[in-house]
Image: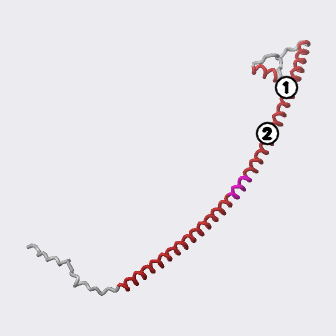
Amino acid sequence: MAPRKRAIAGDSASQDDIDIDVDVDEMIKAKQELDKIRKDREEKRAKLQQDLNAKIANLHTRIQQTIDKHTQQLAEINQKQLDRLHGAIEKCNEIEQLIRNKLAKVQQDGQNLAVMLDLAYEYRFEKAKGRAFSELEHGQVEKGPVQPRAAKRARVDGDISS
């Protein structure tokens, strides 16, 4: 069975049912109190916002100072490292120049030694050639000519001028 529907209570209230004992002066006074509370609240909010802005500005300043200090420290460290690197590069260049000078001296000494050896071999060749010629004159058998290294080297290089 379906539940019963209740009758809707009447929304219409008569003027007699409402008590008209409202005091207008008290209403004005309450409104003034509310306005005063709202004004105090707005002043406190403004003061809090001002304090917050001051703290944020102070914090921002401190952070910026810390960043500047850290940046300065990094710049000094980087400059020291750059100076060390520059000194190391200069030292390396000096060492390389010293090595180049020593290599040039060794190369020159090698060339001088090669010239001296060629002269010595040429002298020995001429001496052996003279001995072989004198042996031929005396009737001895020739064992073959002894050639200096310069002549051998010239044949290997393709320049046969001797």
Disc number placed over residue 146 in the picture, else none: none
Residue at 81% of width from left, 34% of height from top?
A: 107
Residues drawn in magenta: 75-84
Residue at 87% of width from left, 28% of height from top?
A: 116
The secondary element bearing badge 2 is classed as helix
Look at the picture and state if 144 lies above or below 37: above
Residue at 77% of width from left, 47% of height from top?
A: 90
Disc number placed over residue 100 in the picture, else none: 2
> With 27 as the anchor, is 102 left or right in this view?
right
- Which amino acid is tagged 2? Arg
- Which amino acid is tagged 1? Asp
Question: Residue 27, how many percent across, how many down?
Answer: 37, 83
Question: Residue 156, how many percent across, how many down?
Answer: 75, 21
Look at the picture and state if 77 lies above or below 88: below
Q: Is residue 85 magenta?
A: no
Residue at 39% of width from left, 82% of height from top?
A: 28
* Quarter residue 145 falls in: top right
Mark 2 Cα-neighbour bin, 10 Å: few <14, some 14–19, many ≥20: few
* Quarter residue 19 falls in: bottom left
Q: Quadrant of the N terminus?
A: bottom left
Residue behind mark 1: 118
